[in-house]
Amino acid sequence: MAPRSLLDVDDLAPAELVGVLDRAVAFRDALPSRSLLAGVPVLNLFFEASTRTATSFTLAEQRVGADVISFAPGASSLGKGETIADTALTLHGIGVRVIVVRHHESGFARRLADAFDGHVVNAGDGTHAHPTQALLDLMTLRQEFGRFAGLRVAIVGDILHSRVARSNIVGMTMLGIDVTLVGPATLLPDAFASHGVRIERDLDALLPSLDAVMMLRIQRERISGGLLPSLDDYTQRYQLNRARLRSLRNDAVILHPGPYNRGVELTDDVLDDPRSRYVAQVHNGVFVRMAVLDLLVNGAAVAA
């Protein structure tokens, strides 16, 4: 049997998903010994720039005792015409057992996993998936509410180009969360309703009923590319700001995967609001990634 990888959230059964979150909580409450992945070489292969995800994975790998290897892919043989299969064979031959990969091409992590005789963790591929981000978002929600079933969560913004949204849709619906997608038709086509979630265009009407709202980064090139008529139009309809914060329940929470654009999808008032959980999300990411590495290498999915 081929070594197990995590390419998207649905590589986990629902019970395994909860088990990973349980394990992450156990790691948060008491750091494990560094023997979990002692001597296991883990390669961080980031073809896209990253601050939060790359640093979080590196810290997680160090905390479970892995031998961490990081290098710039631009200096690798992949930039000299070598195929993914060639690179995968070489990396396995020198002893790498786990590759954490981020790439601008959707499906790249799958292609690497098909060629590599080891574990692959998808740290984001194109607009396809970002499973560990979804897991840390789920951990943050459970930490806040103690449950998943029946929670009402809205994901707002550029759904079309968001790997974070896609992985969260998978994970949230798997665990019984009521998901609503919100945004203009150019960034949220009606076809997304086929994922078993609702589509709404009116954020103001929805806000009072939510347990959580997740704001997504709006990339300014979407405006120049014609997907949005203007930045002013978008912010008027979908920006989370001081006025809209008044419509959000006091016990609701605000999520954002980062990086965020101040003054675009949210204002400084949101970042200063006590309901914002951005810091908690980043904090939880280390423990989720520790738990994922533990699962893939050791098969441990349930907290001891």
Image: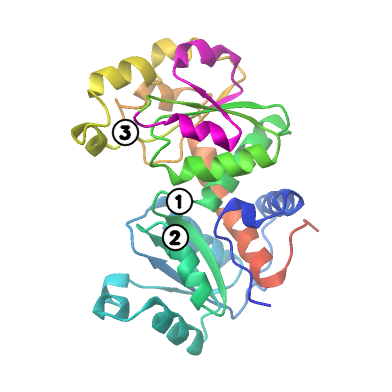
Left or right: residue 300 versus residue 91 is right
Q: Amino acid at mark 2?
A: Gly
Few, some or many residues within 10 Å of mark 2 (<14, 14–19, 20+): some
Is disc 3 placed on a helix, strand or loop?
Answer: loop
Amino acid type, residue under disc 1 in the picture:
His
Q: Which mark is residue 107?
A: 2
State the residue lying farthest toward the right: 304
Regarding mark 1 in the picture, which secondary structure is present there?
loop
As measured in the structure, the alpha-carbon distance from the residue carrying label 2 to the one carrying label 3 is 27 Å
Query: Secondary structure beneath disc 2?
Result: loop
- In percent of width and height, residue 121 lies at 53, 63
Could you say which quadrant of the image residue 188 lies in?
Answer: top left
Q: Residue at x 25, y 80 (%)?
A: 80
Residue 258 in magenta stretch? no
Q: Residues within 10 Å of mark 3 (few under 14, many from 20)?
A: some
Tell me, for residue 128, which label it has, or none.
1
Q: Mark 2 or mark 3, which has the lower sequence index?
A: 2
Q: Up-down: is 276 above or below 111?
A: above
Q: CA distance from mark 3 to mark 1?
A: 22 Å
Residue 197 is one of the magenta-drawn residues: yes
